[in-house]
């Protein structure tokens, strides 16, 4: 089981969009995928896709009471292979609880083995701010994916914020915990001629950093991601062909390329997600 978190020390960078679309793509490719919504303030991942079987509990039960029985905390979405632990921390209490608990930062890492036999991939969406919760999620992950807008100032600020967070986690590395590599994906890249220059500069900002790398894959700014969100449909199902009026590739190509780069161990099954296959899936889902 692979655990990936989608993190950023800033809000509104595309974490939920990335979690929802990457997760649904992996599920359609046949991976048993679990989305975990760890954003108590704006739990938008919890309502992103329709739920077919809703569990009574969610993240609060998992983290506050160590409930790991799947039937109590894992809801099933209408997308085959895609499950969800909803954010039900309505009063935003978990953060204080984690700050006070002696095992606070390690709690999620300690609970993850309960999912090992049931899922191939766990994707955790987080809140866009530096917090104990974010540190806990990072410590539980094998890798972190971090969407970044194509903006040099934000990139520098991100570099500082993320480095501070990773520095804060080093004490845990000495306890034997893994600090995962951070993979930046430039999100909302527009199709103007300086897009490439912006991307190259973002790469330069991080080039001397061993722990943070900038992915080759980028996500263009495209209306399909907003439409997919409002319709509750994975972007790759909504747009599997390149629209004739656009330079950017189809949402399917964008998400597939990202999935292959982040999870190369599943390359074959991702490559098998061709336009024809996704067209069939999308037809069947209607
Ligand atoms: N590549 C994209 N193209 C167009 N719109 C996008 C793209 N990525 C994200 N958006 C839009 O930008 C807004 C913010 O995205 P999203 O909610 O995924 O960010 P977030 O990092 O989860 O935000 P928060 O920190 O508030 O949780 C949403 O309206 C989303 O539809
Ligand atoms: Mg979000």
Image (cartoon, rainbow, N blue to C red):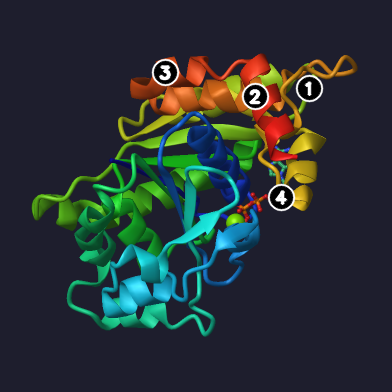
The mark that comes first in sequence, 3 or 2, is 3
Q: Quick check: can you spot residue 198?
A: no
Q: Position of residue 215 (x, y in %)?
A: 48, 25
Query: How far is disc 4 from disc 2 in space, using C-alphas?
Result: 16 Å
Q: Position of residue 272 (x, y in %)?
A: 51, 15
Per the rendering, the mark at residue 278 is: 2
Query: How far is disc 3 from disc 2 in space, using C-alphas?
Result: 16 Å
Callout 4: SS: loop
Q: Position of residue 160 (x, y in %)?
A: 44, 47
- Classify mark 1: residues with Cα within 10 Å, few (<14), some (14-19) or many (20+): some
| Depicted 215 relative to depicted 221: above or below | above
- Classify mark 3: residues with Cα within 10 Å, few (<14), some (14-19) or many (20+): some
Closer to the observer: label 1 or label 3?
3
The mark that comes first in sequence, 1 or 3, is 1
Question: Which residue is labeled 3 in the image?
Answer: 267
Closer to the observer: label 4 or label 1?
4
Question: Which residue is labeled 1 in the image?
Answer: 191
| Depicted 4 relative to depicted 221: above or below | below
| Depicted 140 relative to depicted 204: above or below | below
**Residue toward you, 223 or 149:** 223
Question: Which residue is labeled 4 in the image?
Answer: 232
Is 223 placed left or right of 175 in the picture? right
Q: Quick check: can you spot residue 250?
A: yes
Image quarter of the N terminus:
top left
């Amino acid at each position: 089981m692979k655990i990936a978190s989608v993190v950023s020390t800033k809000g509104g960078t595309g974490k939920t969009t990335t979690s929802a679309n990457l997760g649904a793509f992996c599920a359609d490719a046949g991976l048993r995928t679990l989305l975990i919504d760890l954003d108590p303030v704006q739990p938008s991942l919890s309502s992103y896709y329709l739920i077919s079987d809703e569990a009574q509990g969610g993240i609060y039960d998992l983290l506050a009471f160590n409930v790991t029985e799947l039937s109590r905390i894992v809801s099933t979405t209408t997308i085959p292979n895609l499950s969800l632990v909803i954010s039900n921390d309505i009063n935003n209490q978990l953060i204080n609880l984690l700050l006070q608990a002696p095992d606070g930062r390690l709690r999620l890492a300690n609970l993850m083995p309960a999912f090992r036999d049931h899922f191939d991939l766990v994707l955790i969406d987080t809140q866009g701010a530096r917090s104990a919760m974010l540190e806990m999620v990072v410590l539980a992950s094998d890798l972190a994916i971090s969407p970044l807008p194509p903006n040099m100032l934000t990139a520098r600020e991100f570099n500082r914020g993320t480095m501070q967070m990773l520095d804060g986690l080093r004490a845990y590395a000495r306890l034997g915990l893994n600090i995962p590599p951070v993979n930046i994906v430039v999100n909302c890249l527009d199709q103007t001629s300086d897009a490439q220059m912006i991307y190259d500069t973002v790469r330069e900002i991080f080039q001397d950093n061993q722990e943070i790398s900038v992915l080759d894959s980028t996500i263009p700014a495209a209306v399909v991601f907003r439409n997919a969100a409002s319709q509750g449909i994975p972007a790759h199902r909504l747009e599997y062909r390149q629209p004739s009026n656009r330079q950017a590739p189809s949402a399917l190509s964008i998400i597939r390329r990202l999935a292959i780069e982040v999870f190369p161990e599943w390359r074959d099954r991702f490559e098998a997600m061709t336009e024809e296959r996704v067209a069939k899936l999308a037809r069947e889902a209607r």
